[in-house]
Image: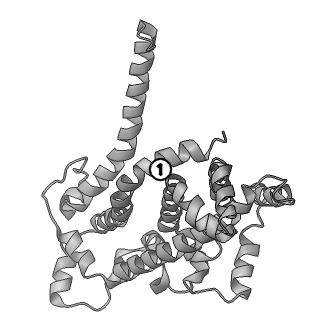
Amino acid sequence: MVDRSLGRKIFSGLNGLLFILFSLSCVIPMIHVLAISLSSSASVTAGEVTLFPVNFSLKSYEYILQNSEFWTAMGISLERVLLGVAISMLLTTLAAYPLSKSKAAFKHQPVFAWYLVMTMLFSGGLIPSFMIVKYTHLLDSIWALVIPSAISVFNVLLLSNFFRNVPKEIEESAFMDGAGHFKTLFSLYLPLSLPIVATLIVFSAVGHWNSWFDGLIYMNSQDKYPLQSYLQTILLESNTKVMTKEYAALLSKVSDRTIKAAQVFIASIPILLVYPFMQKYFISGMMIGAVKE
């Protein structure tokens, strides 16, 4: 039965209003950034831009199209996401499968589970992490951005909880047909766990795409920065080296704020395009994978 009392209606209305305000707090800053990127330099400098472009201009985007440093950083981030997600999902899957077993099936399961949980509570710190990357000769390479964050204990716990919900009869029938653990994992468990797998792919992809601090630490030159690290360090003066007359004329029509706004907006487009297609898996994966039945 549905509660249609006045108190319930008021509660639902307040909840709806709260979610609307929360949604607007997330959307409005992005709209403001987009408006700045599409406005003229003079309007932005004068503080006239709010949620709509003033004196519409695409000069900032024309400037970015000619900025090779931006596209190099974009390519590094795309490479990082592809490698990072693939490696992360492989290691997460291989770790979650044995941890999903009972103590009777895997005698040392509690030991390994607590070992992983301890890493969530205690960290070695920045300096030891940097020393590990340095002495394994990963500095200034794409692997310095991928290997240290290759596995997330939180993701392992989510996936192992989901695996526990897979009916044991399916696994037993696979073993009776001669399937081993790897065959069972990749042919049965993963296809049945598509919602949580898609959720973890989103987590991993967004984490790699938005990460910027490790790029500043592990990369010795700016031309090897991923996109977010590059966006943290861009200065208008750093791009005014040797340029053609047409390039200089274009630069005179844009400002530091419009260029940065345009680059920030372009950097957010890949995630904005991917997330709507993964949203249904994201929601169901979080609901099922986070709670053990």
Within 10 Å of disc 1 (Cα), the crowding (few <14, some 14-19, many 20+) is: many
- Give the total of numbered labels: 1
Q: Residue at x 35, y 57 (%)?
A: 272
Give percent across and percent down for residue 199: 51, 55
Q: Which residue is mark 1?
A: 282
Which amino acid type is shown beneath numbered disc 1?
Phe
Mark 1 residue element: helix
Q: Residue at x 74, y 62 (%)?
A: 98
The reply to whether residue 144 is visible in this rendering is: yes
Reply above or below: 58 against 79.
above
Left or right: 219, with 9 as reference point:
right
Q: Residue at x 43, y 14 (%)?
A: 2
Give percent across and percent down for residue 10: 41, 14
Give percent across and percent down for residue 256: 31, 68
Reply above or below: 101 against 57.
above
Give percent across and percent down for residue 282: 47, 50
